[in-house]
Image (spheres, helix red, strand yellow):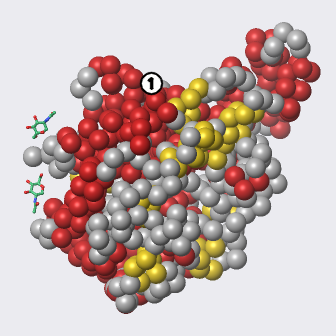
């Protein structure tokens, strides 16, 4: 193309752009005028009807991005083609996600191999206290199934080799590890790798690691403690947890892995431990039908009456539903308990915001309602969507799909209202400010997956393009704000465009966020929801239909 015609093209694109802006403004801006709209935008939450305006801006940005990419003639790095083809646009987005996975993986491999996580800016290893202080390669185990699913074959082989040769958990784990995190990430990751590959080495490692967790279950009730010292077998609870209590999300999110492990190995000890926990929960009285987040493992009594669908509770509900699904719907008593718990939460904790009509689950502190929803609680949109496709009753089907869609919308608003387009750790519903937060300690984002997870389920179930579009927005925002140094990092304040990084590439970036992003741009035949159930770390297990 000659320079002259190139200039002409730029001029006409510019003109077209201006016309689009004018037309958009004419249709969408409030009648009181553009100034008022801008004031509104700066001072208050964007009203939800302006979702259309955002949509238009997003569309224009995409055209612009595409133009830039074409102009720069960027050649994607040579990586193997995904196994499954898709439509043109979706296909290139999927390849883009695959490149993100490879980039983050290479950073980890080159600078933190064998460590739990990578610090992408200072280029060294990182370990959170949940892992103890041994070099247990959490990122390798968490990434394993994602590498496999995305067709990153060499990377998968490197991971497999390390696990085979170096992951002797009993030897490499040091200090106290979290029973819950070790279960969902390590046991879950290895079981998933086994389910996908039928490579027995993974199953053996999963059993070895789960065995190191068993001392935590030696309590008068069988409710496990939170931490176990792998070397000595000493177990204890967090000192801060309501006077030595165990936490609902932790002891309530073991059954998928433990049952599956027992089923695959024939070693019944794991399923027995999980069943015992379920029996205790069944026998307890629930205040107003709700499950408090603290339970004393010695006395079997609830701790203080705090209730949430977010931190310290979340995956307990998820596992009630998924336990039913993963047993081919045979465990219907667990489904009944799920139904009762959700019904109680809908009565007591579900709200619609007055201004923007956003649906959200609040937290309860005793009788006091805290009008706040956590990023972690955003998984629930996906949970309700998954429930809807497993219900037979038409009323339940449509009710829970609708609830799931409304929560997906709310969580999207928490993203769209942030300067970075990335949602905060928690957001509030106060008069004049909805789905945002002013509190500094709630403004961070640590590569959490729950919002994309919900969009993934809703894409699979409704086929509404907006879910893929929202996920693609997130991909671009991750590139813009979280990609740094040799990987991806959390950011400290989603409301500041000049971001500060926390310099941690979480292992769940691979297990969850990348996996859900990859899958949302995949065909439904990749891990279909009627054959696979994802644990709370997004590790897929086969549903036991017989
Ligand atoms: C595993 O689950 C399948 C399907 O429910 C069942 O047929 C099989 O007997 C189970 N195996 C063990 C060892 O529990
Ligand atoms: C629960 O499952 C059992 C065994 O599959 C079945 O006999 C029973 O009818 C089911 N109960 C309900 C309420 O669906």
Ligand 1's quadrant: bottom left
Q: Report the front residue among 135 and 444.
A: 444
Query: If the image is split into quadrants, where does the N terminus sit?
Result: top right
Q: Report the front residue among 220 and 43.
A: 220
Find residue 85 and report its horizontal and vertical position in percent: 38, 43
Q: Furthest-right residue in view?
A: 35
Find residue 498 and report its horizontal and vertical position in percent: 82, 54
Q: Can residue 153 be seen in this view?
A: no
Q: Can residue 233 be seen in this view?
A: yes
Picture layout, residue 377 above or below residue 356: below
Q: Residue at x 56, y 54 (%)?
A: 448
Q: Which residue is drawn at 35% across and 85% down?
A: 233
Q: Residue at x 71, y 39 (%)?
A: 436
* Mark 1 surroundings within 10 Å by alpha-carbon count, few (fewer than 14), some (14 through 19), many (20 or more): some
Picture layout, residue 421 above or below residue 75: above
Q: Within the image, what quadrant is residue 224 found in?
A: bottom left
Tell whether 354 sits left or right of 186: right
Q: Report the front residue among 201 and 97.
A: 201
Find residue 469 and report its horizontal and vertical position in percent: 57, 34
**Label 1 beta carbon less than 8 Å to ligand 2:** no
Tell whether 487 sits left or right of 257: right
Tell whether 267 sits left or right of 59: left
Callout 1: SS: helix
Find residue 80 and report its horizontal and vertical position in percent: 43, 59
- The residue identified by callout 1 is 402
Q: Within the image, what quadrant is residue 492 found in?
A: bottom right
Picture layout, residue 255 above or below residue 414: below
Q: Residue at x 51, y 68 (%)?
A: 243
């Amino acid at each position: 193309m000659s320079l002259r015609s190139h200039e002409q093209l730029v001029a006409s694109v510019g003109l077209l752009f201006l016309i689009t802006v004018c037309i958009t403004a004419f249709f969408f801006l409030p009648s009181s005028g553009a100034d008022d709209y801008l004031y509104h935008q700066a001072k208050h939450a964007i009203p939800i009807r302006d979702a259309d305006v955002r949509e238009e801006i997003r569309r224009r940005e995409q055209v612009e991005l595409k133009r830039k990419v074409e102009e720069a003639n960027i050649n994607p790095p040579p990586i193997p083609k995904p196994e499954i083809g898709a439509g043109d646009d979706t296909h290139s987005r999927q390849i883009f996600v695959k490149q993100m996975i490879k980039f983050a993986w290479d950073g980890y491999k080159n600078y933190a191999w064998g460590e739990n996580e990578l610090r992408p800016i200072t280029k060294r290893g990182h370990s959170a206290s949940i892992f103890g202080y041994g070099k247990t390669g959490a990122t390798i185990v968490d990434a394993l199934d994602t590498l496999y699913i995305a067709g990153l074959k060499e990377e998968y082989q490197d991971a497999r080799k390390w696990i085979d040769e170096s992951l002797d958990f009993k030897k490499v784990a040091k200090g106290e590890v979290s029973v819950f995190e070790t279960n969902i990430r390590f046991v879950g990751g290895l079981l998933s790798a086994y389910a996908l590959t039928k490579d027995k080495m993974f199953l053996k490692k999963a059993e070895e690691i789960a065995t190191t967790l068993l001392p935590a279950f030696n309590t008068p009730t069988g409710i496990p403690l939170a931490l176990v010292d792998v070397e000595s077998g000493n177990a204890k609870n967090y000192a801060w947890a309501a006077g030595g209590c165990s936490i609902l999300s932790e002891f309530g999110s073991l059954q998928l892995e433990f049952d599956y492990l027992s089923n695959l190995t024939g070693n019944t000890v794991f399923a027995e431990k999980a069943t015992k926990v379920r029996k205790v929960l069944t026998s307890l009285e629930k205040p107003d039908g709700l499950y408090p987040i603290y339970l004393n493992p010695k006395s079997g009594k609830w701790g203080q009456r705090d209730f949430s669908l977010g931190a310290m509770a979340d995956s307990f509900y998820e596992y009630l539903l998924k336990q039913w699904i993963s047993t081919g719907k045979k465990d219907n008593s667990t489904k009944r308990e799920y139904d009762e718990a959700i019904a109680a939460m809908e009565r007591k904790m579900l709200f619609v915001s007055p201004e923007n009509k956003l649906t959200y689950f609040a937290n309860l502190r005793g009788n006091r309602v805290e009008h706040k929803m956590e990023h972690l609680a955003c998984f629930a949109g996906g949970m309700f969507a998954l429930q809807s496709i497993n219900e037979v009753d038409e009323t339940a089907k449509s009710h829970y799909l609708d609830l799931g869609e409304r929560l997906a919308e709310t969580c999207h608003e928490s993203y769209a209202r942030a300067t970075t387009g990335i949602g905060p750790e928690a957001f509030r519903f106060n008069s004049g400010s909805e789905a945002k937060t002013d509190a500094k300690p709630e403004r961070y984002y640590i590569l959490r997956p729950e919002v994309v997870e919900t969009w993934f389920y809703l894409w699979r179930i409704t086929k509404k393009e907006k879910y893929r579009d929202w996920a693609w927005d997130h991909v671009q925002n991750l590139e813009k704000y979280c990609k740094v140094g040799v990987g991806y990092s959390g950011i400290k304040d989603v409301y500041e465009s000049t971001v500060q990084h926390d310099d941690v590439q979480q292992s769940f970036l691979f297990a969850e966020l990348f996996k859900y992003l990859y899958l949302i741009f995949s065909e439904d035949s990749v891990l279909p929801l009627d054959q696979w159930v994802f644990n709370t770390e997004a590790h897929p297990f086969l549903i036991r239909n017989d």
